Image: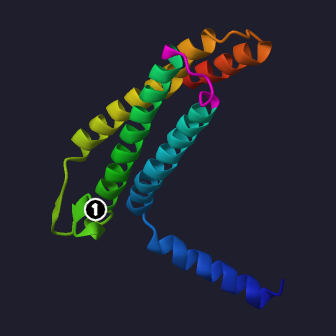
Amino acid sequence: MSAVSADFVVDRYHRFAKMLSMQHLLWLNQVFFKVTTGFTKLSICLILLSMFQRANSGLVRATRTVIWGTIALVVGYYVAAFFVSIFQCTPVSKSWHTKEPGTCVDLDEFRYYNASVNIITSVLVIFTPLPALSKMRQTRPEITELMGLILLGLM
């Protein structure tokens, strides 16, 4: 890399760093957290649905119903929370320019609500498959290992 191109890269980096304040990065973190958490929980629910697709006992049907309810809760909440995170202030730039005139939602209340929904959906995702897995006819080591992996979500 020549000295001219290295200076160009460093200059671009400094300009980019000046554009993003710590408040801006915190705002971006909130937005991306909602997306990644929602998709992670949704993917786990879809994997669980595919695992319990063939069996047809009452417990498995109940498990599938709870999983579908969890999917509805996860999709509904995280889509709404994504938009609230983006548009938490009017104008949006007030989210990272706190001195700018405008209004914002009560962020403390939103964070408490977000934490409670995160805990509820995590508990649902972790504990919903356990009864059905423990009642499977084949108590293979793989089932025990899978239950152990699911319970690691408690950490």
Q: Quadrant of the N terminus?
A: bottom right
Q: Quadrant of residue 84?
A: bottom left
Give 70 or 35, whichever is nearer the viewer: 70
Tell me the kind of residue under disc 1.
Answer: Phe
**Which residue in the rendered view is the most extreme toward the right?**
1
Give 148 or 26, whichever is nearer the viewer: 148
121 to the left or right of 149: left
Q: Quadrant of residue 153?
A: top right
Q: Give me the residue at 73% from left, 9% from top.
A: 139
Q: Which residues are magenta?
A: 51-58
Residue 56 within the magenta-colored segment of the rendering: yes
Give 95 or 1, whichever is nearer the viewer: 95
Image vertical order of residue 20 relative to residue 6, above or below: above
Q: Give me the residue at 60% from left, 75% from top.
A: 13
Q: Which residue is label 1 attached to? A: 87
What secondary structure characterizes most of the magenta part? loop
Coloring basis for residues: rainbow
Q: Give me the residue at 33% from left, 61% from top.
A: 86
Image vertical order of residue 104 relative to residue 78, above or below: below
Element carrying mark 1: loop
- Point out residue 83 in the picture as x, y percentages from the top left corner: 32, 58
152 to the left or right of 114: right
Q: Quadrant of the C terminus?
A: top right
- Point out residue 29 in the picture as x, y percentages from the top left corner: 45, 53
44 to the left or right of 4: left
Tally the marks.
Answer: 1
Q: Quadrant of residue 120?
A: top left
Residue 64 within the magenta-colored segment of the rendering: no
59 to the left or right of 91: right
